[in-house]
Amino acid sequence: MIFGALFKIAIDALWVNKLRSSLTLLGVMIGVTSVMTIISALEGMAQSVEDDLSTLGPATFFVQKIGMAMSHEEFMKKLKRKPIEAETVELISEGCDLVDKISPRAYNQATVKYRDNSLRRVTIKAGFANLIDIIELDVANGRFHSYEDDIYRKSVVFIGHTIKEEFFSNIDPLGKTLKVGAKSYTVIGVAKEIGSTFGDADNFVEIPLAAYTKQFGTPRRGLSLVIKANSVAELPDAMDQVRMVLRAQRHVPFNEEDDFDILTADSILEMLNSITKFIRLGLIGISSISVVVGGIVVMNIMMVAVSERTREIGIRKALGAKQKHILIQFLFESLLVTFGGGLIGVLAGFIIAKALLVSSMGMEINPSVLAISIGLGISTGIGLIFGIYPAMKAAKLDPIKALSYE
Amino acid sequence: MALIETKDLWKTYEMGAETVHALRGASIAIEKGEYVAIMGPSGSGKSTLMNLIGCLDTPSQGNYTLNDKDVSNMTDDELANIRNREIGFVFQTFNLLPRATALHNVELPLIYNGSSTDERKEKAVKALTRVDLADRVTHKPSELSGGQRQRVAIARALVNDPSLILADEPTGNLDSKTSVEIMRLSDELHKQGNTIIVVTHERDIALHAKRVITILDGQIATDEQVTQEMRNAIH
């Protein structure tokens, strides 16, 4: 009952000073907005990276000579490793019963031309025909290359969405001739748009590995392998089988580490998160400064309110208000302002983050429970932390002095 | 036992290096239903005595028993509770909340003892009716005359049915005609059985009471029953 009455007193007091209350609210709102923008944007980006990686498929993993290197030294050390050779593919598909499919992978960059138009630095990807069953790659039009294309080293190309948009926006690309580097290829299929967080994942062409080696030779750093386990449940065991085969083939002594890297979508994500951790914490830290400024505004205004209403406090105490009643009344005031500011800030932060991400990267984000609770938690915390001192000051006023205050 | 019983009350203030004795051993006893005026020039210690009797402050030395409770060593919150239940204050400057309606001002003491919204409203309207302001419940202090404001304050003092009504210079900010009106209300409340203490420095106001206590230099100087002769001498 008392709480209800004290709450109403707080609301009335805020209502009387509408302008002041809204300015204070604005201060908190700006702080919370900046933090929320950062948090929402980071969350959206993390989500998007996760989505990108999920195109690998849940049961798929990579084997590479150099997966990821966290330092220059590590990179230089890994550079000395033996390349992964084409024979390995055979060994794995015969020796690992938990492996469903395997394809070697080779990557390069080249200029792609169609008539007078050209695109520079297009990613050239090569692999077996079974790739289409290993990675999540959807065909929009035509087909992916086939087993026969591999065997007969046919010069056929499967193009990414960006290539189609650039060269064939209004015409059917199938059967047209593209120049990849110096060589001509016939377009046999078009990929569905992938979309991505960083770079352009649609700016690629896929060609059969045989055609690739004919044109570019065997990659100097060796091949990568992309492998699909029988099932998600058997993924760890399949990875172990592959590891054993590779160690045996490469004669790695039992007491030494692997001289190759095995990567899954999860391990890539983990790595990315650990790399970006400090950047993320730093951004949140910097944006938190504005929340603290908002808190100082609240404290300042509450101090003014307490000294302005000294007499009111004296009257209330003379009539029987205990310290806690006065304390709660003033805390309610600061909490109402900061919670209100927090609520608007959460909303505004989300809208700004959404607008930013959509306009700069074409990314979509959804409101997350975590971000909303952080925003509201921060704003309530600010109200408590910066409101408690003025409220205690009010609560401890001597009624006689407060009553004679002019 | 008397409603109010103070024994050898001392109040000492430290003003820098100087020690000021505002009260030097004041002992008084006031029975339930009495109508008492406390008089004295400024600096005599009458405000200090009023603050102690009103439980706004505690004595440096001595005992004060109010309604069988020793309040001399109570904590701030215990005193707040006593003020809420036992004492109705009427101040010289009314001390109403300027932005609140008459009704809300009268409700204030009830908020702090946890009365329900309905109970608060009912009691507040009743108290305002007792001071003849039933038609002014939604008015704010700025929309009321001085006399009306003081009557709102009196309604607020009455609303919790206190043991004691403590009026500090209740007519100090009113013209003489309104003063008479307020003191008539005070007399009326006494007739209804309330215990009233009026602190004043005006003799004609003090003589509305049945007993006058004068204070000088922090001590009780005189304590006498008011006679008709005393009243006649004024007029």
Image (tube, rainbow, N blue to C red):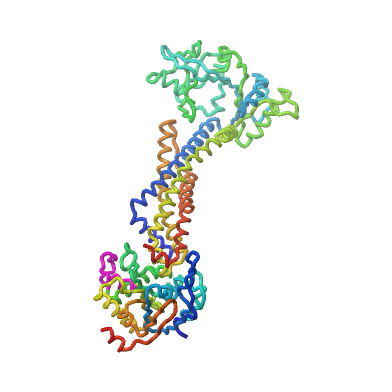
Nearest to the observer: residue B56 or residue A332: B56
Q: Which residues are magenta?
A: B133-155
Tell me what residue is drawn at x 30 percent, y 80 percent.
B204
In the figure, is residue A221 to the left or right of B162? right
Residue B138 is a magenta residue: yes
The image quarter in which residue A231 lies: top right
Q: Give the answer, above or below, for where A30 lies relative to B86.
A: above
In the figure, is residue A350 to the left or right of A265? left
Nearest to the observer: residue A154 or residue A353: A353
Nearest to the observer: residue A379 or residue B171: B171
| Residue placed furthest toward the front | B17
Nearest to the observer: residue A63 or residue A29: A29
On the image, the x and y values in percent for residue B235 come to 25, 84
Residue B157 showing in the rendered view: no
| Residue placed furthest toward the top | A182
Residue A242 is a magenta residue: no
Which quarter of the rendered picture does the N terminus of chain A lie within? bottom left
On the image, the x and y values in percent for residue A404 come to 38, 66
Q: Main secondary structure of the magenta part?
A: helix
Q: Give the answer, above or below, for where B123 lies relative to A62.
A: below
On the image, the x and y values in percent for residue B177 come to 24, 76
Q: Give the answer, above or below, for where A382 lies relative to A315.
A: above
On the image, the x and y values in percent for residue B195 come to 38, 81
Which quarter of the rendered picture does the C terminus of chain A lie within? bottom left
Q: How many marks?
A: 0
Residue A71 showing in the rendered view: yes
The image quarter in which residue A308 lies: bottom left
In the figure, is residue A264 to the left or right of A31? right
Q: Give the answer, above or below, for where A283 lies relative to A22.
A: above
Tell me what residue is drawn at x 46 percent, y 79 percent.
B26
